Amino acid sequence: MEIRTLFLFLAAKLLMHYLVACLSMTVPNITTDQAGLLVLKSRLDLEPNNILVNNWTTRTSVCNWIGVVCGHRHKRVIALNIPSMGLVGTLPPNLGNLSFLVRLNMYNNSFYGHFPEDLAKLRRLKFIGLRLNNFGGQMPAWLGSLRNLQFLSLGNNSFTGEIPLEIGNLQDLRILDVEFNQLKGTIPPHIFNISSLELIALSGNGLSDIPADMCSGVPQLKILYLSWNKLSGEVPPSLQRCSELEEMSLSDNNFTGPITSGFGNLTKLELLYLGKNYIQGMILHGSAWLGTIFE
Ligand SMILES: *[C@@H]1O[C@H](CO)[C@@H](O)[C@H](O)[C@H]1NC(C)=O
Ligand SMILES: *[C@@H]1O[C@H](CO)[C@@H](O)[C@H](O)[C@H]1NC(C)=O
Ligand SMILES: *[C@@H]1O[C@H](CO)[C@@H](O)[C@H](O)[C@H]1NC(C)=O
Ligand SMILES: *[C@@H]1O[C@H](CO)[C@@H](O)[C@H](O)[C@H]1NC(C)=O
Ligand SMILES: *[C@@H]1O[C@H](CO)[C@@H](O)[C@H](O)[C@H]1NC(C)=O
Ligand SMILES: *[C@@H]1O[C@H](CO)[C@@H](O)[C@H](O)[C@H]1NC(C)=O
Ligand SMILES: *[C@@H]1O[C@H](CO)[C@@H](O)[C@H](O)[C@H]1NC(C)=O
Ligand SMILES: *[C@@H]1O[C@H](CO)[C@@H](O)[C@H](O)[C@H]1NC(C)=O
């Protein structure tokens, strides 16, 4: 009898614990998104005439704020488009609460500091555009867990370290832009196994090794920028399998000749930059292509 009472008492206690836990667990909603963006705003060093000052306020729904797009079905923030707005500041971890975010475009501002790891929670992200900012620290390995990413543009920042192997997990990636950072080491072979890739921009780093079979797994690659690195040896003969290439830059490296006959298979090539290697060619510059993707 006593044991039965004790059992019931314990069971009831357990149930109470469970109910209390459920009630106190907040389900994220549009208010969570608003709170996250207000924390972002508070971290910005805004000039009084910046449009966000009077636009991002609680007087109107977050869905009416400039640069913010909400979904129809869930009424949650699905896109943050704030390119070229002269924004200076760091990103708060609270952005990781915008759990419906698909598109994050911060192109051409002055954001600095780390790209917070809490953003690894944003499993729906397809587009990350950070090009032309001052982000620093190691290029985050956790980017490799965002399996829906199609567009990853980190160019013209100050990311350091190596390109994480995990980037090879992003099997829907079409655009990979990490040019003009301070990355070093080997270009992971895993990247050249992402069959959806159309653009790889790695120029302007300190990268020192390129996989010999670089073109065996990227049948759709149209643009490959490798200039201004420390790549050496012969240009990999597997290049002839990148038969969709339209633009390629290898200039300002230490590649040695001779140019393999494989170039002859690249019938769609319109731009080829080879200058400043130990192979003959002309010097041209540029990666103008990326500038056209951001609105
Ligand atoms: C969002 O959730 C909080 C509790 O977590 C609640 O107080 C608030 O009313 C909710 N807001 C909306 C718009 O549903
Ligand atoms: C904020 O900007 C958006 C887009 O330009 C505009 O539609 C909205 O009315 C603005 N809201 C306020 C409060 O100024
Ligand atoms: C960057 O943004 C500024 C405004 O802050 C604009 O004047 C400039 O043209 C933009 N540059 C590019 C390359 O988009
Ligand atoms: C949002 O994120 C921050 C930091 O990541 C966290 O402290 C906070 O509790 C989260 N939830 C809400 C509802 O803001
Ligand atoms: C990106 O960085 C490179 C190297 O520092 C620089 O030459 C180039 O002008 C930058 N791009 C833009 C659009 O500022
Ligand atoms: C690339 O893919 C091929 C075929 O699926 C596989 O055999 C190879 O191990 C992969 N290489 C890397 C570096 O992941
Ligand atoms: C190319 O190799 C030479 C000699 O080994 C070295 O001095 C130079 O710094 C290298 N250049 C690059 C861009 O790696
Ligand atoms: C040359 O390109 C064609 C496609 O245009 C491709 O089928 C063929 O395999 C390539 N040749 C070599 C040797 O890779």
Image (spheres, helix red, strand yellow):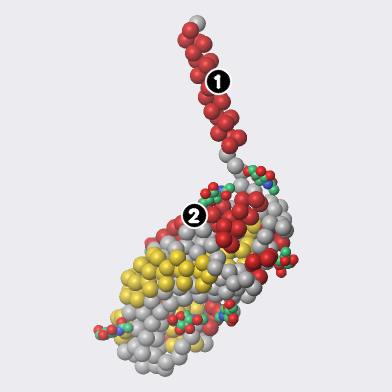
* Residue nearest the viewer, comparing 239 with 31: 31
Q: Position of residue 203 (x, y in %)?
A: 42, 79
Crowdedness near tag 1: few (<14), some (14–19) or many (≥20) residues, C-alpha within 10 Å: few
Task: Identify which amino acid the numbered label 2 is placed on.
Answer: Asp
Q: What residue is drawn where x is 35% and y is 83%?
A: 253
The answer to whether marks 1 and 2 mark residues whose Cβ atoms lie closer than 8 Å is: no
* Residue nearest the viewer, comparing 100 with 91: 91
Crowdedness near tag 2: few (<14), some (14–19) or many (≥20) residues, C-alpha within 10 Å: some
Between the C-alphas of marks 1 and 2, the distance is 37 Å
CB at disc 2 and ligand 4 closer than 8 Å: yes
Q: Is residue 198 left or right of residue 234?
A: right
Q: Is residue 190 visible?
A: no
| Residue situated furthest front in the rendering | 48
The residue under label 2 is 118
**The label number, if any, that marks residue 12 in the structure image:** 1
Q: What residue is drawn where x is 43% and y is 62%?
A: 140
Q: Position of residue 150 (x, y in %)?
A: 54, 65
Q: Against 249, is 72 above or below? A: above
Q: Quadrant of residue 142?
A: bottom left
Q: What residue is drawn where x is 38% and y is 69%?
A: 160
Q: Is residue 85 visible?
A: yes
Q: Position of residue 151 (x, y in %)?
A: 54, 67
Task: Identify which amino acid the numbered label 1 is placed on.
Answer: Ala
The local secondary structure at tag 2 comes to helix
Q: Position of residue 271 (x, y in %)?
A: 49, 87
Q: Is residue 85 left or right of residue 217?
A: right
Q: Quadrant of residue 276?
A: bottom left
**The label number, if any, that marks residue 275 in the structure image:** none
* Residue nearest the viewer, comparing 93 with 3: 93
Q: What residue is drawn where x is 62% and y is 71%?
A: 48
| Residue situated furthest top in the rendering | 1
The local secondary structure at tag 1 comes to helix
